[in-house]
Image (cartoon, rainbow, N blue to C red):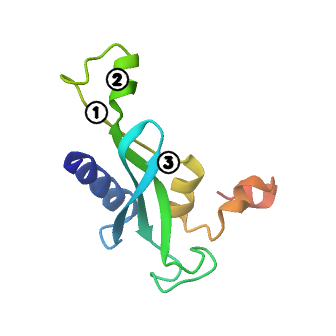
Amino acid sequence: MADLKGVLYAFARQAFGGERRVRFRPDYFPFTEPSAEIAIDCFICNGTGCRTCGGSGWLEMGGSGMVHPNVLRNAGYDPARYQGFAFGCGIERVHMLRSGTPDIRLYEQNDLRFLETT
């Protein structure tokens, strides 16, 4: 789990800037155990709370965790010998965080004025 956290901290700082605060929180995902969500502080309000972050000061980046032993077993690997971690986030979320787009719903509204400028 420490390697996973290190990789995700490094990714967040490389992708979104070294000044961003990064947070891990326990969560549930069915194919990983333990599981965690990773979030960065809101780039709009700098963590004070706004509409973009829902007042929390944080923007969820994605989910992560250690691959569950049953997943390894079902893939033909011995979980006593192998382990791994998994993480993921939506491409819209990454683009939103990198470009400063204030509302993720803009990607789903099919407004060509917005889509052609991003």
Where residue 37 sits in the image (x, y, percent)? 42, 56
Q: Nearer the viewer, mark 2 or mark 3?
A: 2
Marks 3 & 1, CB-CB < 8 Å contact: no
Q: In this figure, which residue is indicated by the disc labeled 2?
A: 72
Q: Earlier in the sequence, mark 2 or mark 3?
A: 2
Where residue 4 sits in the image (x, y, percent)? 27, 47
Quarter of the image with the C terminus is bottom right
The secondary structure type at the circle numbered 1 is loop
Cα distance between the residues tagged 3 and 1: 18 Å
Q: Nearer the viewer, mark 3 or mark 1?
A: 1
Q: Determine if residue 116 is in view.
A: no
Query: How many numbered dots are placed on residues in this image?
Result: 3
Q: Residues within 10 Å of mark 1 (few under 14, many from 20)?
A: some
Where residue 20 sits in the image (x, y, percent)? 36, 71
Q: Residue at x 18, y 22 (%)?
A: 81
Marks 1 & 2, CB-CB < 8 Å contact: yes
> From the viewer's perspective, is residue 22 above or below residue 50?
above
Q: In this figure, which residue is indicated by the disc labeled 3?
A: 89
Q: Earlier in the sequence, mark 3 or mark 1?
A: 1
Q: Determine if residue 92 is in view.
A: yes
- Taking depth in this image into account, of 115 and 8 the one nearest to the observer is 8
Q: In this figure, which residue is indicated by the disc labeled 1?
A: 84
Q: Quadrant of residue 17?
A: bottom left
Q: Residue at x 23, y 53 (%)?
A: 6
Q: Residue at x 40, y 26 (%)?
A: 71
